[in-house]
Amino acid sequence: MFTGIVTDVGRVRAVRDTNRDRRFEIETSFDLATVDIGASIAHAGCCLTVVEKGEGWFAVEVSGETLDKTTLSDWREGRRVNLERAARVGDELGGHIVSGHVDGVGEVLSVAEEGGSHRVRIRVPRPLHRFIAPKGSITVEGVSLTVNEVEDDAFGVNLIPHTWDVTTLGELKPGARVNLEIDMLARYLARWRETA
């Protein structure tokens, strides 16, 4: 489990197709002495397992299913990636409960300055849009955000300067593809409503 609070911005240092799928090596400032092989780390909101590590880097392997359902198929060497280590019991829950299971890929429609912040509008693939509500939570590229408004299959979020500066969201442009994870409670509530 994660909270959507990014704790490092890593960089893809190598990409290689293997006989088992695709392998990414990620440079990080995490203290890797405290990261075990088999640990879960969220990469732009996608939970991946550490399979190897070295001085200032670790490796993950990504299945075809993950490549098909996320933006990871777009990743190349040099790409910056939001990273978050798994939450531990007793950690502060600063964002919201995040599973690291990407629900879909959205498209950035617009990015506009608004005071000291930035307003970003994102189109959501249908039928995922029905799980997004004003003042609800959503994860965009692994970052926990509050939904400001919803209009049909698009929603808006406001990025404060801190979020803009310390995550990859400050690099967003119209047309960019972004990993989305809907609020877990909304998912279960909708399923209960469908089956009750």
Image: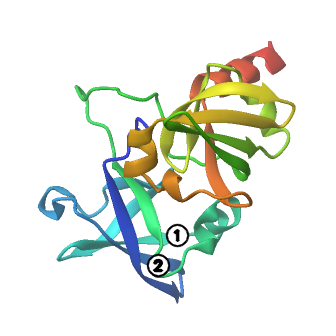
- The type of residue carrying mark 1 is Val
| x and y, in percent, of residue 87 in the image | 31, 38
Identify the mark nearer the N-term, 2 or 1: 2
Q: Which residue is mark 2?
A: 23
Q: Residue furthest top?
A: 196
Q: Which residue is mark 1?
A: 62
- The structure residue drawn at horizontal position 71% and vertical position 28%, both measured from the top left corner, is 132
* Contact? badges 2 and 1 (CB < 8 Å): yes
Q: Look at the image and tell me in which quarter the N terminus lies.
A: top left
For residue 164, above or below residue 87: below
Crowd around label 2: few <14 · some 14–19 · many ≥20 (10 Å): some
Residue 44 appears anywhere in the view: no
Which picture quadrant has residue 29? Answer: bottom left
Q: Nearer the viewer, residue 35 or 75?
A: 75
| Separation of residues labelled 2 and 1 (CA atoms) | 6 Å
Position of 86 with respect to 185 (left or right) is left
Dividing the image into 4 quarters, which one contains the C terminus? top right
Q: What is the crowding at mark 1: few (fewer than 14 residues within 10 Å), some, or many (at least 20)? A: some
Q: Position of residue 150 (x, y in %)?
A: 77, 27
What residue is drawn where x is 40% and y is 50%?
165
x 68%, y 60%: residue: 176
Residue located 47% across and 82% down the image? 77
Q: Position of residue 82 (x, y in %)?
A: 43, 56
Q: Nearer the viewer, residue 24 or 146?
A: 146
Is residue 182 visible in this depiction of the protein?
Answer: yes
What amino acid is found at the position of numbered circle 2 in the picture?
Arg
